Image (spheres, rainbow, N blue to C red):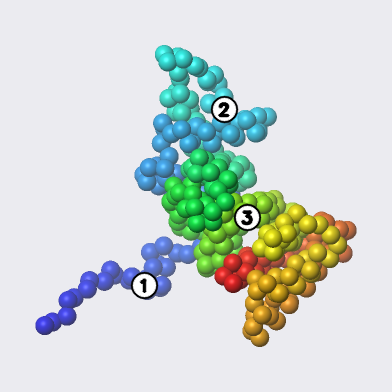
């Protein structure tokens, strides 16, 4: 019996040929995208059914921007339409169309990267089921809570996968996670560490850790690198408090005690391979906070590389602990 032939696409898996088809770009900021690239980005979202003129999610996202940044007034068309009430007086479709035009214009033309990413992240949150998310916060049974979390993020995860695909295609240095938009310098680290770890941390019991990490990512994008280190330290501290059943405790030198408790309870590796790494991190986190963070008068100014290294190490450490 002869082997069944398999047809291979020309150049599939050949980096040189694929490079000739579409040259790879270095990771870049959103603001570096050309208008034509942004329009392709938007058209793909439209083609896949994520954005359309009559979209309540688009309306909610643009309305959110207008409420929080009224002086800037990003959604000028939407703002001109007063919401009407009553069965025959509703103008919701008109407002959705106006919001869609505002959404398109902001993403396609705005030079304010922070505004575009805030809009896209606000739009992403509209795909989280609030009922399941709120129910998960109240659920004490871990198995039931995890099931509620997965249902709450089901549609969000599909949108995040789409957005991450587009960010990769256009080499944008952003990764969408359940905790927010994370800056990246390496796609492999983002996909193998950031996304799975932040997915686990979407459990409501880690809500405050996720909040610290989300703020950490925002500080990085804002260029506040000293504050990144402060937030990273807080995230590690809070995570260990939760894992040791002592969240909320405060005190001088607490991180050292938390590491000691974590080792004692088997929350971090005690093997001859893992323990030296943990010992290094145990010293590194408070050292960076003491010398480069905003928590104390800094001895040296934190750089983007310092901040990125701190973020990567925090996520690697959390991954280690969650797998323990």
Whichever of labels 3 and 1 marks the residue nearer the N terminus, that label is 1
- Which circle marks residue 291 in the picture? none
Residue 126 showing in the rendered view: no
Q: Which residue is mark 1?
A: 13
What residue do we see at 66% from left, 86% from top? 272
Q: Quadrant of the C terminus?
A: bottom right
Q: Which residue is mark 3?
A: 206
Mark 3 crowdedness (10 Å alpha carbons): few <14, some 14-19, many ≥20: some
Q: Residue furthest front?
A: 141
Q: Position of residue 64 (x, y in %)?
A: 58, 34
2 vs 3, front mark: 3
Which image quadrant for residue 238? bottom right
Near-viewer residue (206 or 168): 206
Q: Is residue 44 left or right of residue 58?
A: left
What residue do we see at 33% from left, 71% from top? 11
Q: Position of residue 185 (x, y in %)?
A: 60, 64
Whichever of labels 1 and 2 marks the residue nearer the N terminus, that label is 1
What residue do we see at 68% from left, 29% from top? 71
3 vs 1, front mark: 3
Q: Quadrant of the N terminus?
A: bottom left
Mark 2 crowdedness (10 Å alpha carbons): few <14, some 14-19, many ≥20: some
Assess whether mark 3 and mark 2 are in contact (beta carbons under 8 angstroms): no
Mark 1 crowdedness (10 Å alpha carbons): few <14, some 14-19, many ≥20: few
Near-viewer residue (222 or 285): 285
Instruction: Give the answer, above or below, for where 119 lies relative to 24.
Output: above
Residue 76 showing in the rendered view: yes
Real-space Cα separation, disc 2 to disc 3, in angstroms: 38 Å
Which image quadrant for residue 242? bottom right
Q: Which residue is mark 2?
A: 76
Q: Position of residue 170 (x, y in %)?
A: 48, 56
Q: Residue furthest left?
A: 1
Assess whether mark 1 and mark 3 are in contact (beta carbons under 8 angstroms): no
């Amino acid at each position: 019996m002869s082997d069944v032939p398999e047809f291979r696409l020309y150049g599939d898996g050949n980096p040189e040929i694929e490079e000739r088809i579409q040259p790879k770009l270095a990771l870049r900021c959103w603001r570096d995208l050309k208008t034509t690239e942004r329009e392709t980005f938007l058209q793909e979202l439209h083609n896949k059914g994520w954005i359309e003129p009559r979209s309540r999610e688009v309306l909610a996202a643009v309305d959110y921007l207008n409420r929080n940044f009224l002086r800037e007034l990003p959604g000028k068309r939407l703002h001109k339409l007063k919401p009407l009430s009553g069965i025959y007086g509703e103008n919701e479709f008109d407002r959705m169309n106006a919001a869609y035009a505002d959404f398109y214009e902001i993403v396609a033309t705005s030079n304010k990267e922070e505004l575009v990413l805030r809009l896209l992240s606000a739009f992403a949150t509209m795909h989280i089921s609030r009922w399941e998310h709120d129910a998960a916060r109240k659920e004490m049974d871990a198995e039931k809570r995890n099931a509620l979390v997965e249902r709450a993020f089901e549609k969000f995860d599909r949108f995040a996968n789409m957005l991450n695909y587009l960010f990769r295609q256009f080499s944008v240095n952003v990764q969408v996670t359940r905790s927010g938009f994370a800056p990246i310098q390496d796609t492999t680290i983002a996909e193998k560490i950031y996304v799975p770890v932040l997915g686990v941390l979407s459990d409501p019991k880690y809500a405050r850790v996720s909040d610290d990490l989300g703020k950490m990512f925002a500080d990085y994008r804002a260029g506040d690198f000293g504050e990144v280190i402060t937030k990273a330290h807080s995230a590690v501290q809070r995570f260990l408090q939760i894992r040791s059943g002592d969240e909320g405790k405060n005190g001088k030198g607490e991180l050292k005690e938390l590491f000691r408790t974590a080792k004692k309870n088997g929350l971090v590796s005690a093997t001859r391979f893992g323990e030296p790494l943990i010992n290094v991190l145990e010293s590194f986190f408070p050292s960076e906070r003491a010398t480069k963070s905003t928590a104390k008068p800094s001895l040296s100014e934190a750089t983007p590389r310092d901040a990125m290294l701190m973020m990567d190490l925090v996520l690697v450490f959390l991954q280690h602990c969650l797998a323990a």
